[in-house]
Amino acid sequence: MAFNCYEHTVQYYETNKMGITHHSNYIRWMEEARIDFLAQIGWDFAKLEALGIVSPVVSVECRYQIPTRFSETVKIRVSVEEFKGVKLKLGYVMQNGEDDVVCRGRSEHCFLDGNGRPIRMAREFPQLFQCLTELAGQESV
């Protein structure tokens, strides 16, 4: 299954005095891309929240390779690296306009109910469980 890359244009306020994107922004872009990816697979945040599902970040990692600068477009590809029902591990590949990899990232999430208790995904939300299970290990683009 192929998905559209999420695209972000680097804003002036996201750069530092050297004109390079500040490292913290890449994590924000991963969040933007994750929200877009979930919407593309039919599980947007409004739907998840309406079902009482929250998905906090458990860990995040970025490997910076090439700096980006103001007004550059960064394409972000998201993939489900692993999902076994408890934790969701997503991978991110960010590329510039020349298709050079500028950053690789990972984020790990869990699924909780509105009271902060872990959700038994396979039993409580079998359609979401199946969707994420099928996507695990597949290329997103």
Image (tube, rainbow, N blue to C red):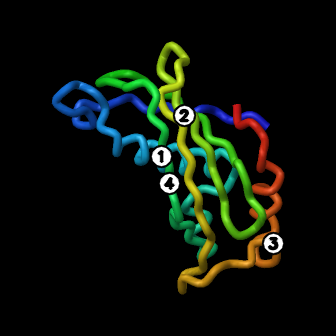
For the N terminus, the quadrant is top right
Q: Which residue corresponds to mark 1?
A: 32
Q: SS of the residue at dot 1?
A: helix
Residue 17 rendering spot, x and y as whole percentages: 16, 30
Amino acid type at mark 4: Val
The label shown at residue 60 is: 4
Foreground residue, 10 or 25?
25
Circle 1 crowding by C-alpha within 10 Å: few under 14, some 14–19, many from 20: some
> What residue do we see at 69% from left, 52% from top?
42
- Indicate which disc, 2 or 3, sits on the residue closer to the N terminus: 2
The label shown at residue 93 is: none
Q: Quadrant of residue 111?
A: bottom right
Is label 1 in contact with label 2 (beta carbons under 8 Å)?
Answer: yes
- Indicate which disc, 3 or 1, sits on the residue closer to the N terminus: 1
Residue 124 left/right relative to 112? right
Circle 3 crowding by C-alpha within 10 Å: few under 14, some 14–19, many from 20: some
